Amino acid sequence: MEKKRYLNELINRGLFRFDHLSIMNIDNGPVAKLFSNAILEQEICLFANTVKSGSAYCEFLQQRVLSSMQNRRPLPVARFADGEYAFYSYTLGCNGLYKQAESVAAIKKIIPLHIAAMKYLAANGLLAPLVYPGNSHSAVGGLFSFLHPKKDSSGIDFLDFLNSAGIIFNSSDYIPFYVVYAFLTSPEFAAVIDGKKICILNSEYNEKSCYGWFAKSSSQPRISYIPIPAEYVATRWEETKKEILNKIPPDIDLCLAGAGVGALLICADVARTFSVPAIDAGHVLNMMNGRADKSNGARLYTLRKSK
């Protein structure tokens, strides 16, 4: 008997649907050429039924960020994809481009802290998991299940993980994974932070490249940089949290973090401490630093059509 799936419940109740994430001026063609056209299946993703389009999701995120900045309210935003799904499945498959966990035991020990951070995001910010038809297959069970090719169920499994942790998934606490990338690389985001004080938490920072990246969009934020470890933030954040938070200027307007699976913990604590948007920027920080190569190339929804 197939177990009940939280994703199926959300769709059957008319709360969510799968739809095409169409965002104005985005060009995913070069990314498909770099990897393969198969990656374009990720353009079909989970939508709340209250949201009509991908561009509407970008506007939704922009309004949440503006409101947070203007009213000094916390807005943590964290993305979840393959690395996070492996981590929350208690496997070392989470150690991809960067080392996230030393052992399965280390993951199990820290999971309660991650769940607490997710609950904080659900109440005050936005969860941005990558959920699309290709990673939402229910596992095939039964005596002869070994005869069937294994299908990716990581997306649907993650939603089950949230549900089992008591995290209610709804339109106010969810945005699609790639909306974060699309917004952070947009002229609209550059305009939002023009003249604002932003803080970057990452293991790498190229000041000239970052200022140049924003200057291309006629934006001049004032950037402060706080270095964080390149590895194991997901399991060791508590060891360095106080020291790092104490270095962040108290009058920042927004924070961008790059820390793999650990970005969840950073964004939750920074947003809570400073009452600002704290966004898991990931690959976009590599772009700002002129180091897209660290991500093994471009990502979907980060490139614009040439004029």
Image: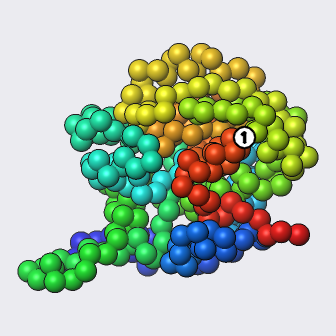
Give the colouring mode of the picture: rainbow
Q: Is residue 88 visible?
A: no
Residue, far right: 218
Of residues 250 and 257, the one nearer the viewer is 257
Of residues 60 and 207, the one nearer the viewer is 207
Of residues 47 and 109, the one nearer the viewer is 109
- Residue type (three-letter) at the residue carrying disc 1: Ser
Q: How many marks?
A: 1
The residue lying at 51 percent from left, 39 percent from top is 259
The residue lying at 49 percent from left, 28 percent from top is 229
Image location of residue 148, percent across then percent down: 21, 83
Tell me if residue 297 comes above or below residue 68 in the rendering: below
The residue lying at 72 percent from left, 63 percent from top is 303
> Looking at the figure, which quarter contains the C terminus?
bottom right
- Residue 140, quarter of the rendered image: bottom left
The residue lying at 65 percent from left, 38 percent from top is 256
Image location of residue 116, percent across then percent down: 41, 38
Tell me if residue 47 comes above or below residue 215 in the rendering: below
> Looking at the figure, which quarter contains the N terminus?
bottom left
State left or right for residue 206 relative to residue 235.
right
Image location of residue 92, percent across then percent down: 29, 47
Tag 1's secondary structure? helix
Q: Is residue 305 visible?
A: yes
Image location of residue 226, percent across then percent down: 63, 25
State left or right for residue 204 relative to residue 24.
left
Residue, far left: 143
Mark 1: few/some/many CA within 10 Å (<14, 14-19, 20+): many
The residue carrying mark 1 is 68
